[in-house]
Image: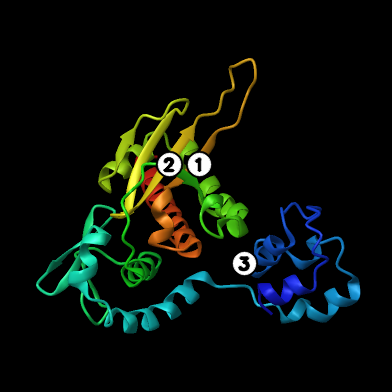
Amino acid sequence: MNHINIYKLLKKSNCGDCNVRSCFGFAISVFNGERKLEDCPHLDSQTFTKIKDSIKVRDHREEIERLIDPLKDKIALVDFQKVASGLGAEVKSGMLAVTCLGKEFLLDTNGNIHTLCHVNPWLKAPLLHYVINSGNAQLSGKWISYGELKNGIIMDQYFTKRCEEPLRDIADKYEGFLDDMVTIFKGSQVFIEKTDTSWIIYPFPKVPFLIMYWKAEEQSDIPSESKLKILFDKSTDYFLNNEIIYVLGRGLVEMFTKISAKHYDIIS
Protein backbone atom coordinates (compact mmCIF):
# COMPACT_ATOMS: atom_id res chain seq x y z
CA MET A 1 0.00 0.00 0.00
CA ASN A 2 1.30 3.43 -0.87
CA HIS A 3 0.43 6.81 0.66
CA ILE A 4 -2.61 7.27 -1.61
CA ASN A 5 -4.10 3.93 -0.49
CA ILE A 6 -3.45 4.83 3.14
CA TYR A 7 -5.04 8.28 2.74
CA LYS A 8 -8.25 6.76 1.33
CA LEU A 9 -8.75 4.84 4.58
CA LEU A 10 -8.39 7.88 6.86
CA LYS A 11 -11.11 10.13 8.22
CA LYS A 12 -9.85 13.08 6.08
CA SER A 13 -10.83 15.59 8.76
CA ASN A 14 -7.33 17.06 9.12
CA CYS A 15 -7.92 17.10 12.86
CA GLY A 16 -4.24 17.11 13.78
CA ASP A 17 -4.68 14.59 16.61
CA CYS A 18 -1.71 12.63 15.20
CA ASN A 19 0.44 15.80 15.37
CA VAL A 20 0.53 16.08 11.58
CA ARG A 21 -1.21 19.01 9.92
CA SER A 22 -3.26 17.02 7.39
CA CYS A 23 -4.45 13.46 6.81
CA PHE A 24 -2.58 13.40 3.50
CA GLY A 25 0.58 14.46 5.27
CA PHE A 26 0.03 11.70 7.84
CA ALA A 27 -0.36 9.13 5.04
CA ILE A 28 2.95 10.27 3.54
CA SER A 29 4.61 10.09 6.96
CA VAL A 30 3.42 6.49 7.43
CA PHE A 31 4.63 5.56 3.96
CA ASN A 32 7.99 7.18 4.68
CA GLY A 33 8.36 5.39 8.01
CA GLU A 34 8.04 8.60 10.08
CA ARG A 35 4.73 7.68 11.69
CA LYS A 36 2.98 4.44 12.56
CA LEU A 37 -0.51 3.70 11.32
CA GLU A 38 -1.76 3.40 14.90
CA ASP A 39 -0.78 7.03 15.52
CA CYS A 40 -4.13 7.95 13.98
CA PRO A 41 -6.64 7.69 16.87
CA HIS A 42 -9.58 7.62 14.47
CA LEU A 43 -8.62 4.53 12.49
CA ASP A 44 -10.78 1.62 13.63
CA SER A 45 -9.05 -1.51 14.87
CA GLN A 46 -10.56 -3.73 12.19
CA THR A 47 -9.13 -1.63 9.35
CA PHE A 48 -5.78 -1.35 11.14
CA THR A 49 -5.51 -5.12 11.55
CA LYS A 50 -6.47 -5.67 7.92
CA ILE A 51 -3.92 -3.39 6.31
CA LYS A 52 -0.97 -3.01 8.73
CA ASP A 53 1.03 -5.86 7.16
CA SER A 54 0.47 -4.64 3.60
CA ILE A 55 2.26 -1.32 4.11
CA LYS A 56 5.77 -1.25 2.73
CA VAL A 57 7.89 1.58 4.08
CA ARG A 58 9.34 3.74 1.32
CA ASP A 59 13.05 3.48 0.52
CA HIS A 60 13.98 6.88 -0.92
CA ARG A 61 17.50 5.91 -1.98
CA GLU A 62 16.19 2.87 -3.86
CA GLU A 63 13.51 4.99 -5.54
CA ILE A 64 16.02 7.60 -6.64
CA GLU A 65 18.28 4.92 -8.13
CA ARG A 66 15.33 3.50 -10.09
CA LEU A 67 14.54 6.94 -11.50
CA ILE A 68 17.95 7.48 -13.02
CA ASP A 69 17.86 5.13 -16.06
CA PRO A 70 14.53 6.50 -17.44
CA LEU A 71 15.85 10.03 -16.90
CA LYS A 72 19.04 9.23 -18.81
CA ASP A 73 16.92 8.11 -21.78
CA LYS A 74 15.20 11.51 -21.86
CA ILE A 75 18.50 13.41 -21.91
CA ALA A 76 19.04 12.27 -25.51
CA LEU A 77 16.07 14.44 -26.52
CA VAL A 78 17.52 17.63 -25.03
CA ASP A 79 19.33 20.13 -27.27
CA PHE A 80 22.24 21.20 -25.06
CA GLN A 81 23.02 24.26 -27.16
CA LYS A 82 19.43 25.46 -26.91
CA VAL A 83 18.97 25.02 -23.15
CA ALA A 84 22.44 25.86 -21.80
CA SER A 85 21.96 29.61 -21.36
CA GLY A 86 18.61 29.27 -19.58
CA LEU A 87 20.11 26.78 -17.13
CA GLY A 88 23.17 28.91 -16.39
CA ALA A 89 25.32 26.22 -18.04
CA GLU A 90 27.54 25.99 -21.11
CA VAL A 91 28.46 23.42 -23.74
CA LYS A 92 31.97 21.98 -23.70
CA SER A 93 33.10 19.39 -26.26
CA GLY A 94 29.50 18.41 -26.93
CA MET A 95 28.69 17.96 -23.24
CA LEU A 96 26.63 20.20 -20.98
CA ALA A 97 28.76 21.72 -18.21
CA VAL A 98 26.72 22.51 -15.09
CA THR A 99 28.21 23.88 -11.87
CA CYS A 100 26.75 22.06 -8.85
CA LEU A 101 27.83 23.21 -5.38
CA GLY A 102 30.87 24.85 -6.90
CA LYS A 103 32.00 21.72 -8.78
CA GLU A 104 31.78 21.25 -12.55
CA PHE A 105 29.69 18.33 -13.79
CA LEU A 106 29.75 17.35 -17.47
CA LEU A 107 26.65 15.63 -18.83
CA ASP A 108 26.86 13.72 -22.12
CA THR A 109 23.99 12.96 -24.50
CA ASN A 110 23.59 9.47 -23.00
CA GLY A 111 22.87 10.95 -19.58
CA ASN A 112 26.23 9.98 -18.11
CA ILE A 113 27.82 12.42 -15.66
CA HIS A 114 31.55 13.06 -15.72
CA THR A 115 33.28 14.80 -12.82
CA LEU A 116 36.35 14.53 -10.64
CA CYS A 117 34.26 13.98 -7.50
CA HIS A 118 31.83 11.24 -6.46
CA VAL A 119 28.26 11.73 -7.70
CA ASN A 120 25.64 10.77 -5.12
CA PRO A 121 22.19 9.61 -6.33
CA TRP A 122 20.57 12.51 -4.46
CA LEU A 123 22.45 14.92 -6.73
CA LYS A 124 22.46 12.84 -9.92
CA ALA A 125 18.67 12.48 -10.24
CA PRO A 126 17.95 16.20 -9.58
CA LEU A 127 20.66 17.21 -12.07
CA LEU A 128 19.02 15.10 -14.78
CA HIS A 129 15.64 16.62 -13.88
CA TYR A 130 17.15 20.10 -13.99
CA VAL A 131 18.37 19.57 -17.55
CA ILE A 132 15.27 17.74 -18.80
CA ASN A 133 12.92 20.43 -17.46
CA SER A 134 15.07 22.99 -19.31
CA GLY A 135 13.68 25.91 -17.31
CA ASN A 136 14.44 29.43 -18.45
CA ALA A 137 13.89 32.25 -15.98
CA GLN A 138 15.90 34.96 -14.31
CA LEU A 139 16.52 34.73 -10.58
CA SER A 140 13.98 37.06 -8.98
CA GLY A 141 15.84 37.82 -5.76
CA LYS A 142 12.57 37.17 -3.91
CA TRP A 143 12.70 34.32 -1.42
CA ILE A 144 9.89 31.90 -0.56
CA SER A 145 9.54 28.96 1.83
CA TYR A 146 9.22 25.33 0.78
CA GLY A 147 5.48 25.47 1.48
CA GLU A 148 5.11 28.31 -1.03
CA LEU A 149 6.55 26.25 -3.88
CA LYS A 150 3.99 24.73 -6.24
CA ASN A 151 2.41 21.82 -4.31
CA GLY A 152 4.98 22.38 -1.57
CA ILE A 153 2.34 22.65 1.14
CA ILE A 154 1.72 18.90 0.83
CA MET A 155 5.22 18.05 2.08
CA ASP A 156 5.95 21.23 4.02
CA GLN A 157 6.01 19.63 7.47
CA TYR A 158 8.04 16.73 6.15
CA PHE A 159 10.62 19.09 4.63
CA THR A 160 10.88 20.90 7.97
CA LYS A 161 11.39 17.68 9.89
CA ARG A 162 13.80 15.94 7.52
CA CYS A 163 15.77 18.89 6.15
CA GLU A 164 15.54 22.07 8.22
CA GLU A 165 15.53 20.60 11.72
CA PRO A 166 18.50 18.22 11.17
CA LEU A 167 20.49 21.05 9.59
CA ARG A 168 19.66 23.25 12.59
CA ASP A 169 20.92 20.51 14.90
CA ILE A 170 24.22 20.45 13.00
CA ALA A 171 24.54 24.24 13.26
CA ASP A 172 23.82 24.03 17.01
CA LYS A 173 26.36 21.30 17.66
CA TYR A 174 29.24 22.40 15.44
CA GLU A 175 29.76 26.14 15.64
CA GLY A 176 31.29 27.47 12.44
CA PHE A 177 30.76 24.22 10.55
CA LEU A 178 28.25 25.63 8.07
CA ASP A 179 30.56 28.58 7.44
CA ASP A 180 33.22 26.07 6.38
CA MET A 181 30.83 24.05 4.22
CA VAL A 182 29.54 27.11 2.41
CA THR A 183 33.12 28.16 1.66
CA ILE A 184 34.08 24.69 0.39
CA PHE A 185 31.03 24.53 -1.88
CA LYS A 186 31.53 28.05 -3.27
CA GLY A 187 28.54 29.62 -1.55
CA SER A 188 28.59 32.87 0.37
CA GLN A 189 27.61 34.32 3.71
CA VAL A 190 24.99 37.06 3.35
CA PHE A 191 23.51 39.64 5.67
CA ILE A 192 19.83 39.07 6.45
CA GLU A 193 18.37 41.39 9.04
CA LYS A 194 17.31 39.78 12.33
CA THR A 195 19.18 36.51 11.65
CA ASP A 196 22.41 35.49 13.39
CA THR A 197 23.94 34.01 10.25
CA SER A 198 22.71 33.42 6.70
CA TRP A 199 24.25 31.68 3.70
CA ILE A 200 23.47 31.12 0.03
CA ILE A 201 24.59 27.94 -1.70
CA TYR A 202 23.95 26.82 -5.26
CA PRO A 203 23.08 23.16 -5.81
CA PHE A 204 22.45 24.31 -9.40
CA PRO A 205 23.12 27.68 -11.05
CA LYS A 206 19.43 28.68 -11.11
CA VAL A 207 18.39 26.93 -7.87
CA PRO A 208 19.96 28.72 -4.90
CA PHE A 209 19.22 27.78 -1.29
CA LEU A 210 19.11 30.59 1.28
CA ILE A 211 19.84 29.13 4.72
CA MET A 212 18.93 31.37 7.66
CA TYR A 213 19.97 30.52 11.21
CA TRP A 214 18.99 31.94 14.60
CA LYS A 215 20.91 30.88 17.71
CA ALA A 216 19.13 29.91 20.93
CA GLU A 217 18.56 32.81 23.31
CA GLU A 218 18.98 31.37 26.79
CA GLN A 219 20.10 34.51 28.61
CA SER A 220 17.35 36.85 27.41
CA ASP A 221 14.16 37.76 29.25
CA ILE A 222 12.26 35.52 26.85
CA PRO A 223 14.37 32.39 26.17
CA SER A 224 13.97 30.88 22.70
CA GLU A 225 15.17 27.78 20.88
CA SER A 226 17.47 27.93 17.89
CA LYS A 227 15.86 27.99 14.46
CA LEU A 228 16.91 27.30 10.89
CA LYS A 229 14.93 28.03 7.74
CA ILE A 230 15.68 27.23 4.09
CA LEU A 231 14.22 29.54 1.45
CA PHE A 232 14.18 29.35 -2.34
CA ASP A 233 14.15 31.89 -5.13
CA LYS A 234 10.61 32.49 -6.39
CA SER A 235 11.68 31.25 -9.85
CA THR A 236 12.51 27.75 -8.55
CA ASP A 237 9.31 26.20 -9.91
CA TYR A 238 10.57 26.84 -13.45
CA PHE A 239 13.45 24.45 -12.88
CA LEU A 240 12.48 21.72 -10.37
CA ASN A 241 9.32 20.45 -8.70
CA ASN A 242 8.84 20.33 -4.94
CA GLU A 243 9.66 16.60 -4.66
CA ILE A 244 13.03 17.03 -6.36
CA ILE A 245 13.76 20.06 -4.15
CA TYR A 246 13.08 17.80 -1.17
CA VAL A 247 15.55 15.22 -2.54
CA LEU A 248 18.18 17.96 -2.85
CA GLY A 249 17.52 19.22 0.66
CA ARG A 250 17.62 15.76 2.16
CA GLY A 251 20.80 14.97 0.27
CA LEU A 252 22.52 18.09 1.57
CA VAL A 253 21.58 17.15 5.12
CA GLU A 254 22.95 13.62 4.68
CA MET A 255 26.20 14.96 3.25
CA PHE A 256 26.66 17.59 5.97
CA THR A 257 25.79 15.04 8.67
CA LYS A 258 28.49 12.64 7.45
CA ILE A 259 31.09 15.38 7.06
CA SER A 260 30.31 16.91 10.45
CA ALA A 261 30.57 13.53 12.16
CA LYS A 262 34.00 12.93 10.61
CA HIS A 263 35.08 16.47 11.47
CA TYR A 264 33.98 16.00 15.08
CA ASP A 265 35.89 12.69 15.35
CA ILE A 266 39.05 14.36 14.09
CA ILE A 267 38.99 17.28 16.53
CA SER A 268 37.71 15.32 19.55
Q: Is residue 186 left or right of residue 175?
A: left
Disc 2 residue type (three-letter): Ile
Kind of residue at disc 1: Lys
Label disc, if present, on residue 229 of the rendered structure? 1
| Spot occupied by residue 79 in the image (x, y as percentages of width and height) | 22, 76
Q: Which of marks 3 and 1 is in front?
A: 1
Q: Mark 2 points at which residue?
A: 211
Q: How crowded is mark 1: few (under 14 residues within 10 Å), some or many (20 or more)?
A: some
67 to 150, vertically: above or below:
below
**Mark found first going from the N terminus, 2 or 3:** 3
Disc 1 to disc 2, C-alpha distance: 6 Å
Q: Which residue is drawn at 29% across and 79% down?
A: 75
Q: Indicate the secondary structure of the residue bearing disc 3.
A: loop
Is the C-beta separation of discs 1 and 2 under 8 Å?
yes
| Rendered residue at 47%/58% (across/down) | 250
Q: Name the residue under label 3.
A: 32
